[in-house]
Amino acid sequence: MNAMMKLQKVLVIGAGFVGSSLATSLRSEGVQVCCTRRQEGGEGTVQFVLEEEGGEGTVQFVLEEEETWGNLPKEVDGVVWTLPARPFSQVRRFYDTYLQSILDSKKPVIVYGTTGRYQVEEEHQWVDERTKYGQTASGREEGEDFLQEKGATVMVLAGIWGESKTGETRSLKSWIEKGYHINSINKFLNLAHVDDIVRATQEVLNRSEFRGQVINVCDGNPMLWRDIILGFGLELPPMTQDHASPGKLQRPSKRVSNSLLQSIMGKDYKFQMVMGPDATGA
């Protein structure tokens, strides 16, 4: 069995719903965390927040502006990238400039992906980490594949629910309100609780045997939109299909397997199914 690593300092690129919870959890275990967060009022701009013991300082980090990449910490024990890995040209340049030295040092780099990468031909097909997939309109899969080939771990996240450490909540009802169910009543929604995502990320950060792998992070209990909506008494929001994205919801429905995740998490896997139609994890 591979020995557990002792992390001293971790960079979280993108301290959003999951990233902020991960940073809080890591700090509770004595890990120094540096993280980026979106600058309030700055659309598309990310500010790098450097948090050191005994004080806090900020310097600028904008993913789209290469001249700011030098503000990232040079010495870290691991990196978690929660932002979409796109466009590919930028991902490749960011690898050449920053991530390569970290991966060459055999330190963990984790990239959050999406189950949207799987494209199946049969309705309600089960898929796992070996399932073939095609490119989506976002093109983020190309960046994820590239980083995986270089030694990064891709954690493929399903729909996220629960309560983040900042107090933000996402429930099944919030997914309905986003309108993803339109024309998808008989399709499956795969879910993952934010606490399980955080715990799984920490496991992968600490265990070298999962480097360079793809890991599906979901609860293993996909739910039909039909059943979710019935749980709310057919209260549907006044929405119509987004015609700006033709074919967006036309791919066959799929159910995502979490067998590898279960082997990683063991008894620490807390939310293997949603606890109720209005569950938030609060």
Image (spheres, rainbow, N blue to C red):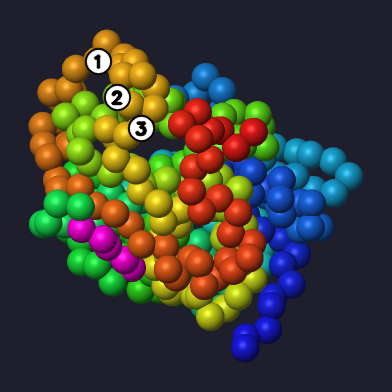
Quick one: 269 or 71, which is closer to the camera? 269
Query: Which numbered disc covers residue 239?
Result: 1
Q: Amino acid at mark 3?
A: Ile
Which residue does the image show at 33% across and 27% down from the upper left?
Answer: 229
Q: Residues within 10 Å of mark 3 (few under 14, many from 20)?
A: many
Q: Residues within 10 Å of mark 2 (few under 14, many from 20)?
A: some
Residue 5 makes an appearance in the image: yes
Please tell me in which quadrant of the rendered image residue 206 appears.
bottom right
Query: Which numbered disc covers residue 179?
Result: 2
| Foreground disc of the pair 2, 3 | 3
Quick one: 263 or 78, which is closer to the camera? 263
Quick one: 252 or 243, which is closer to the camera? 252
Q: For numbered disc 2, what is the local secondary structure?
A: loop
Which residue does the image show at 81% across and 58% down from the upper left?
Answer: 30
Residue furthest out toward the right:
54
Label 3 belongs to which residue?
228
Magenta residue span:
125-129
The magenta stretch spans residue 155: no
| Foreground disc of the pair 3, 1 | 3
Which residue does the image show at 36% across and 32% down from the upper left?
Answer: 228
Instruction: Locate residue 161 relative to residue 175 in the image: left or right.
Output: right
Q: Position of residue 187 (x, y in %)?
A: 22, 41
Query: If the image is split into quadrants, where does the C terminus sit?
Result: top right
Q: Do the residues bearing badges 3 and 1 touch, measured as CB atoms within 8 Å?
A: no
Query: If the image is split into quadrants, where does the N terminus sit?
Result: bottom right
Q: Do the residues bearing badges 2 and 1 touch, measured as CB atoms within 8 Å?
A: yes
Please tell me in which quadrant of the rendered image residue 44 appears.
top left
- Which of the two discs, 3 and 1, labels the residue nearer the N terminus? 3
Alpha carbon distance from label 2 to label 1: 7 Å
The image shows residue 44, relative to residue 232, as above or below, that is below
The image shows residue 7, relative to residue 226, as above or below, that is below
